[in-house]
Image (spheres, rainbow, N blue to C red):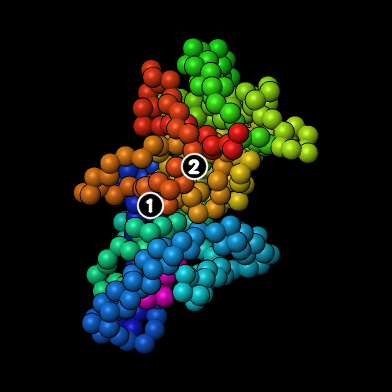
Amino acid sequence: MSSSSESESESESDCGDEQRYRWYPFHVRFEVETGPPTSLDERREAQLEAHRFIQAKYDAGVPFITKDLLRDVVRQLEEDGNDTLSITGLNGVAVDYPIETGKENPHPMCGPGYICIMKKLVLEYRILERLLTVVDPKWFMPRRAYLPVKLSYIAEIRNRETDEVVSFAPPSDYATASRKFEQAKQSLEGSELFAQFKSTLASVTIPPGINKIVALGCSTMAWPNEARAMTSMTQHILALTIRDFLASGYATEAPGESRPEIKCYAQDPMYTPTDEQVLGEAGFTLVDDPRAFLEIDEASVVISVYPDIPVRQIVADIARPAVMIWNRPRDPDPEKTYTDPESPRVYRMLEEYIELPFPPDWSYEDIAIYVRKTTE
Ligand SMILES: C[S@@+](CC[C@H](N)C(=O)[O-])C[C@H]1O[C@@H](n2cnc3c(N)ncnc32)[C@H](O)[C@@H]1O
């Protein structure tokens, strides 16, 4: 790499053999920013300046992720023949990314026996902590430093010789997944736990006009590990239960409108064709990143349990949903990094909500139900 270019190559999971490629989404990107040669001191100063600028914008209440930004990303992705995506930074400067879905990525961790394909495009959401992370000035990319989102890809790793996919979910059997989903649905719907959950919701005034349930990061039901598959099923079934509960009379119409039909949207880059089929039959519309965020508004219920992306900070910037079911704020450990960290804006948003607990014997003690306070 020449002194006039900067690069960043990251993965979110270490991988050295086929076992490690299995299952958990593996993100890849490779970015190069070219420009005139600059000294380390100049880069250090540029980084400080970027951080000061970003903090000032945050303090002034400027939203970092906006629906206009996400809509523009979707528009560009859906444009026929478009192979470049332009993202405008918080400083007003646009940066172009080539759209590389389906291409091979020279990922250094892949090893000579494997190839890494950039399978699914996802956004990397760069919330406050991320934008303010201090990097070695050697790697500092002055133009990208201001971007609220960047492009990333979920990788598909293939054995170079056999072409066999060694990452992602192996194609799971639709008939089995569908049967298990139906069994889980019947058992949960009749359970004491779900009865308690519904009576908790019924104990407060639900904002009127709810017409959408948006589930993010509920994972795939195709995990070979039964417990993980069950967790994913439970979260999707919870979404359906809320829909049915609201439809049974708790969703009241907004003034001057008729009672809304309630739709269910779900987004998770791990979804397999089996998830698509089973969840589609159950009434979900599955959407690709970042489209679920565009569905979130004042008439929505958001469900997101331990997501890998900063759902709470994004939602705090884009909407005030009627109900959220997500992690309650925790005391952050400064030694750890979190995928969905709290922020001053998240705390301020939660002041507008009533926090309700999950049924006590539910294994989700970190999760709470937030219902927007009504003016009544
Ligand atoms: C730690 S897992 C939690 C899964 C599940 N909710 C649970 O409680 O076990 C995080 C989930 O976030 C999903 N995720 C990652 N990026 C996402 C995105 N852009 N949109 C929605 N979900 C995403 C991952 O695929 C994964 O299923």
Asked if residue 33 is positioned above or below residue 245 in the image, the reply reads below
Q: Which mark is residue 137?
A: none
Q: Where does label 2 land, which residue?
A: 352
Residue 178, position as x, y percentages in the image: 58, 24
Q: Is residue 20 left or right of residue 29?
A: left
Query: Considering only vertical position in the picture, is 218 above or below 248?
Result: below
**Residue 55, picture quadrant:** bottom left
Q: Nearer the viewer, residue 314 or 343?
A: 343
Mark closer to the chain start, 2 or 1: 1
Name the kind of residue labelled 2 in the image.
Glu
Q: Secondary structure at mark 2?
A: loop
Residue 237 visible within the image: no
At 37% from the left and 23% from the top, the residue drawn is 363
Ligand 1 found in image quarter: top left
Residue 170: image location, x then y, percent: 47, 37
Q: Position of residue 14 (x, y in %)?
A: 29, 50
Marks 2/1: CA–CA distance: 13 Å
The residue labelled by disc 1 is 344
Q: Which residues are magenta?
A: 141-147
Residue extending furthest bottom? 36
Q: 83 or 365: nearer the eye?
A: 365
Question: 285 or 318: which is nearer to us?
Answer: 318
Q: Position of residue 137 (x, y in %)?
A: 26, 74
Quadrant the N terminus occupies = bottom left
